[in-house]
Image: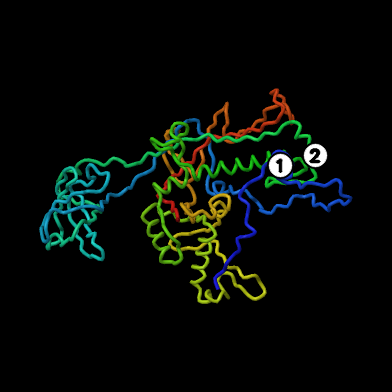
Amino acid sequence: MALSVNSTPGYSLTPSPSQVATPGSYISDFDFLSQYLPDTHEKEFERYGNRSISSFLRLVGAEMPSNSDLIKWTEQGRLHIKYTNVASAGSSTDDTAVFTVSDAGISAVAIRKGQTVMISDNTAASTLNNKGIVTNVSGLDFTVAFYEAGGQANYAGTVTVFVYGSEFAKGTLGMDGAIEAESEIFENSPIILKDKYSVNGSDMAQIGWVEVTTENGASGYLWYLKSEHETRLRFEDYLETSMIEAVPAEANSGAIASAKGTEGLLYVLENRGNVAQGQLTALTEWDDVVARLDKQGAIEENVIFVDRGMSFDIDTMLAAQNNFGSSGSSYGLFDNDQDMALNLGFTGFRRGYDFYKSDWKYLNDATMRGGIIGGAINGVLVPAGSTTVYDQVLGKNAKRPFLHVRYRADQAEDRKMKSWIVGSAGGASNSDLDAMEVHFLSERALCTLGANNFFLFK
């Protein structure tokens, strides 16, 4: 029989950061005509545990100041030359042939006269290939003289060509031309985030009988302090989730008149990263991930932040590699026995590269991405360590974490996380407003370096 979980009691998705203790929020009505007093529990029960979801960027990134509206950096291009959409004008057994490159974004080939090339058929399961020397180059065309006596192989369609060296006769001139270093310039701009909490002076003097607490350790009988702390915690969570979810406002969009947006992590990975669809439940599927990483930066250590479902899929996949895994009696590394709790989880594994697994609370939280259907994300693979890029503001190469937040700051203004109080209550005396307003502000952007080394699992 399949497992079925009742829909009741459900879970609340609506916060209650009320400014005062009311029957609708935390305190029940008392009937003072009754001669009986209720037996009360004065401490608030934390039924949802730690409700904060921030921690992802703290684990994998860093924060550093920036003093510009625009952040730009340069990432290295490929070192070697390869084209994958090349057509031959020659026929089978021709000693020489002219090849035309049709790869996207190519206006002139970087292959030069005198270089030696490897040519491989793109047809599935084909073993046809040639090696030759380039005798002429013109625009998108280059001529190859084949080393093989049989001439050009009988290619069925397009071929892949890459340079593996060069060869020159004695007493000849040097290489024609030179190749400029290839690089790509990326940019992002910060956005301003704000929030506010307000309570009037009279309600600040209101008594309460329930002791409240929040995730950051604040406790006491003053409800406005709880609400202020929860506003701060909520804002701190938004500082992270906005860097994950943000998108730039597109031209002719409804938001473009009032907001510019910024490139969040998921947006960057959708456009410049590696994207995998479906569940990864077998090692052969992970082999496809490893094969793609081989073609990218080949970063040795990677961290996978996953939702609960993908975490279980990985555990089940790894357990199946042990002969006793199907019975649940042993996973090999844990030395499980009858007198200890059976550990059915894995924190990491090695398959070509080191992969460390971590649950990402943001993907499981019922008030955030947990349970959504459209646009669901199962996990993100993040390379560990740092990379070297050319920082156009500093004007030199600099080591940066693959993920890092840049916040606006200089000697006079630090906008990493600002907070200030306005009003005439709660110790403030800078306004005739009979209230205390606590304001929060930050201005920041996320820089995703080497997005080609990341994986987005959907």
Question: Quick one: 16 or 124, which is closer to the camera?
Answer: 16
Question: Quick one: 434 or 103, which is closer to the camera?
Answer: 434
| Distance Cα–Cα, label 1 vs label 2 | 14 Å
Q: Is mark 2 on a helix, strand or loop?
A: loop
Judged left or right of residue 407, residue 230 is: right
Of badges 1 and 2, the one in the foreground is 2
Which of marks 2 and 1 precedes in the sequence? 2
Question: Quick one: 271 or 300, which is closer to the camera?
Answer: 271
Judged left or right of residue 315, residue 156 is: left
The image quadrant that residue 433 belongs to is top right
Residue at x 55% of width, y 61% of height: 347
Amino acid on which disc 1 is placed = Lys
Up-down relation of residue 118 to residue 197 (above or below): below
Residue at x 71% of width, y 29% of height: 435
The image quadrant that residue 179 belongs to is top left
**Quick one: label 2, few (<14), some, or many (20+) residues within 10 Å?**
few
Q: What element carries label 1?
A: helix
Which residue was labeled with disc 1?
226
Percent of width and height locating residue 250: 40, 38
Q: Quadrant of the N terminus?
A: bottom right
Amino acid on which disc 2 is placed = Ile
Which residue was labeled with disc 2?
207
Percent of width and height locating residue 426: 74, 31
Up-down relation of residue 373 to residue 444 (above or below): below
Dots 1, 2 in contact, CB < 8 A: no
